[in-house]
Image: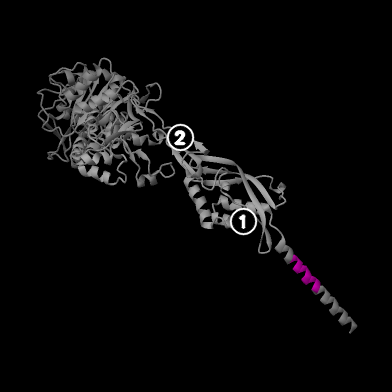
């Protein structure tokens, strides 16, 4: 009995001590203070995640009484969205060595690194004040927040402003440095309503007539104005435009302001080659995501402005600064990243040659290319008709809008990048292949009679019967389809296809501009009729004007074709693209024959007006018929090169020449270009 009582007493004592120990532990847990480093690390982690609500929860009671959670979150959101803050990292050191002061406060220095609209920035000089306060009987370290914890120099009424620093778009220049596309000066025509309204009834029709825009276009712009003393922009004009400016300047309320914009000194002649820039569209923004574009930017829309967009556009810079008391003036620059201007690009294109070709084509639908045969430099790529790219920097008059609407995409169809049936201009290729393979003996005359020849299922027509057997020279002078059809059949599809490739046919042209790929056929020379038709440039053979210029340039290089050059990067070192497209031994034969095409009175390239420059050349009338009975339209070709000191090869195609002289319509146009350019 004694033993039981003693055991019970010990058990009670032990239980009492356990309860006391647990109570002391709970009390200690409630009163123990968090470490300053724990609060700082929590705040830091939330800051790096941009979890501003969780940051707010760590603020002191006193601070929370001064700023609401919504205001706190909005302050950070607004600033960080403005500066595009990402990848935030907070750096601190020696946390364990920091000690509270007598007021139970501790000051923690740190710096912040982040990516911004103006680039990566590291901002030093932050100081976070922590103070100890009791929360639910527990001592905790809380943040004595102020605006300086966003940026060290930021005050409560200050703004953080981010501005984009725009780069200068790169220039496009010709081979002599003549500008083809450049950031230049324009002038904005505008109206100050308070000065204009008294004369509005008479002045409005005047302005509309001078600018060739409707009165409604002007009125709609004026209606949007909220202050009668403010300048209302109407249109932009070229900086050197005088006639319209003089007339407009005489009207009360009309004012001018200097403006900047893309300027295209070559105008229409270069429209499809150079292209233009205009406001970026939503689908383009998606396509070029993460390339630095904003909805306010412009982008190359076609031509070389589009081809070289990445190199021309440059790289935006930025500036982030603090504006004191809400003013816009920069009091403290946080970071500035300089803009990187776009790259200037120099072309092999010759301003004068391009302009002359476009002028001579006189609005006819067609395409032309010009090259230096010795170097491969492309001197002109012309599509006609075209458009003036300056209209996208200034404004489009009503007459232009109507013309484009009536004509559809006629002016915007880039013809020089397309491929076409070359017609008889292709006979140089057939002749060269025939000579190289030994099929053609230039002195051998084929006995061809009549204007139609048939062999089995193969039928071929020619323009005339010259009344005698036809040799190679005769076949070129008279452009005899039957001669070249027969020779193509003798060459055979394997040799013809193989040797045609030596002229670059079927290859992608090694230049930046995306010219469509040429071809000898759709799916091989699958029939004798197709082989025969291909021999005189019909069938399925397709070439661009540039392809043809390059093919004829081989006559200036002992049979080699130089690599085409569109962009100049220092001095040009001619480089062979296709070696011995024409066998060296046959070059003189072909030159002499093609000179006769131009100089012989019976030659298809002969004209009564003698060219000042001695030329070789070949005409071609490409029939666009789908079958033998199709009375379809015809494209006219002429390809020519100066002979004595070859400097220029021009190929030109004009659409719809039927009943206008066929290919003979094109000959005097090309001759005039040679006379004017090489004189």
Q: Nearer the viewer, residue 605 or 166?
A: 166
Between the C-alphas of marks 2 and 1, the distance is 42 Å
Q: Position of residue 31 (x, y in %)?
A: 71, 62
Q: Residues within 10 Å of mark 2 (few under 14, many from 20)?
A: some
Quadrant occupied by the N terminus: bottom right
Q: Could you tell me which residue is drawn at 60 percent across and 52 percent down?
A: 43
Q: Is residue 136 magenta?
A: no
Front: mark 2 or 1: 1
Q: Nearer the viewer, residue 619 or 383?
A: 383
Q: Which residue is most to the right?
A: 2
Marks 2/1 in contact by CB < 8 Å: the verdict is no
Q: Position of residue 645 (x, y in %)?
A: 28, 15
In this rendering, position of residue 668 left or right of residue 526? left
**Residue beneath label 1, please?**
60
Write down the region rendered in magenta.
16-25
Q: Quadrant of residue 434?
A: top left
In this rendering, position of residue 69 left or right of residue 645? right
Q: Secondary structure at mark 1?
A: loop
Q: Nearer the viewer, residue 157 or 74?
A: 157
Q: Nearer the viewer, residue 225 or 361?
A: 225
Q: Quadrant of residue 267?
A: top left
Q: Position of residue 405 (x, y in %)?
A: 20, 42
Q: Quadrant of residue 400?
A: top left
Going from N to C along the chain, the mark reached first, 2 or 1, is 1
Q: Could you tell me which residue is drawn at 50 percent across and 47 percent down?
A: 79
**Residue beneath label 2, please?**
339
Q: Is residue 18 magenta?
A: yes
Q: Position of residue 60 (x, y in %)?
A: 62, 56
Q: Could you tell me which residue is drawn at 58 percent across and 47 percent down?
A: 149
């Amino acid at each position: 009995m004694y033993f039981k009582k003693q055991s019970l007493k010990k058990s009670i004592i032990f239980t009492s001590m356990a309860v006391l120990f647990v109570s002391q532990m709970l009390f200690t847990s409630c009163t123990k203070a968090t470490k300053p480093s724990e609060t700082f690390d929590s705040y830091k982690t939330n800051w790096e995640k941009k979890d501003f609500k969780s940051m707010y929860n760590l603020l002191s009671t006193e601070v929370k009484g001064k700023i609401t959670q919504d205001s706190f979150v909005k302050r950070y959101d607004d600033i960080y969205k403005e500066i595009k803050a990402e990848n935030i990292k907070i750096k601190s050191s020696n946390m364990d060595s920091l000690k509270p002061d007598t007021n139970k406060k501790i000051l923690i220095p740190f710096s912040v690194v982040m990516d911004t609209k103006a680039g990566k920035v590291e901002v030093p000089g932050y100081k976070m004040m922590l103070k100890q306060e009791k929360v639910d009987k527990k001592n905790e370290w809380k943040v004595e927040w102020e605006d300086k914890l966003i940026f060290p120099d930021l005050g409560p009424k200050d703004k953080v402003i981010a501005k984009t620093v725009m780069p200068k778009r790169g220039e496009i220049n010709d081979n002599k440095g003549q500008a083809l596309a450049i950031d230049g000066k324009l002038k904005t025509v505008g109206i100050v309503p308070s000065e204009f309204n008294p004369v509005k009834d008479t002045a409005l029709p005047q302005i509309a007539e001078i600018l060739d825009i409707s009165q409604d276009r002007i009125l709609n712009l004026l209606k949007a104005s909220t202050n009668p003393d403010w300048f209302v922009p109407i249109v932009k004009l070229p900086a050197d435009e005088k006639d319209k400016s003089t007339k407009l300047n005489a009207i009360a309320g009309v004012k001018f302001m200097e403006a900047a914009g893309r300027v295209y000194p070559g105008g229409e002649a270069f429209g499809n080659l150079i292209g233009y820039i205009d406001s970026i569209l939503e689908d383009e923004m998606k396509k070029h995501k993460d390339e630095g574009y904003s909805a306010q930017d412009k982008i190359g829309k076609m031509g070389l402005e589009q081809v070289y967009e990445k190199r021309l556009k440059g790289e935006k810079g930025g500036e982030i600064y603090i504006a004191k008391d809400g003013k816009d003036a920069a009091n403290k620059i946080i970071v500035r990243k300089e803009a990187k201007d776009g790259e200037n690009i120099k072309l092999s294109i010759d301003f004068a040659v391009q302009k002359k070709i476009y002028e001579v084509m006189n609005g006819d639908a067609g395409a032309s290319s010009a090259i230096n045969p010795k170097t491969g430099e492309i001197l002109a790529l012309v599509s006609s008709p075209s458009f003036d790219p300056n209209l996208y920097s200034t404004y489009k008059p009503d007459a232009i809008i109507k013309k484009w609407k009536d004509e559809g995409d006629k002016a915007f169809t880039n013809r020089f990048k397309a491929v076409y049936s070359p017609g008889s201009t292709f006979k140089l290729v057939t002749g060269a292949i025939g000579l190289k393979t030994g099929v053609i003996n230039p002195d051998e005359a084929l006995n061809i009679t009549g204007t139609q020849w048939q062999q089995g299922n193969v039928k071929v027509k020619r323009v005339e019967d010259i009344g005698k057997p036809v040799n190679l020279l005769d076949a070129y002078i008279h452009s005899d389809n039957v001669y070249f059809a027969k020779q193509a059949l003798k060459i055979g599809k394997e040799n013809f296809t193989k040797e045609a490739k030596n002229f670059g046919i079927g290859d992608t042209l090694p230049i930046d501009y995306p010219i469509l790929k040429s071809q000898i056929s759709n799916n091989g020379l699958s029939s004798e009729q197709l082989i025969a038709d291909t021999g005189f440039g019909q069938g399925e053979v397709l070439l661009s004007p540039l392809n043809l210029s390059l093919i004829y340039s081989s006559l200036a290089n002992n049979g080699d074709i130089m690599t085409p050059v569109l962009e100049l990067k220092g001095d040009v070192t001619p480089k062979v693209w296709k070696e011995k497209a024409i066998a060296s031994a046959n070059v003189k034969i072909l030159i002499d024959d093609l000179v006769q095409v131009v100089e012989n009175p019976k030659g298809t390239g002969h004209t009564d007006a003698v060219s000042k420059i001695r030329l070789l050349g070949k005409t071609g009338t490409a029939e666009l018929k789908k079958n033998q009975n199709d009375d379809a339209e015809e494209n006219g070709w002429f390809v020519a090169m100066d002979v004595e000191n070859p400097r220029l090869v021009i190929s030109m195609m004009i659409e719809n020449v039927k009943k206008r002289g066929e290919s003979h319509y094109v000959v005097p146009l090309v001759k005039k270009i040679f006379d004017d350019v090489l004189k």
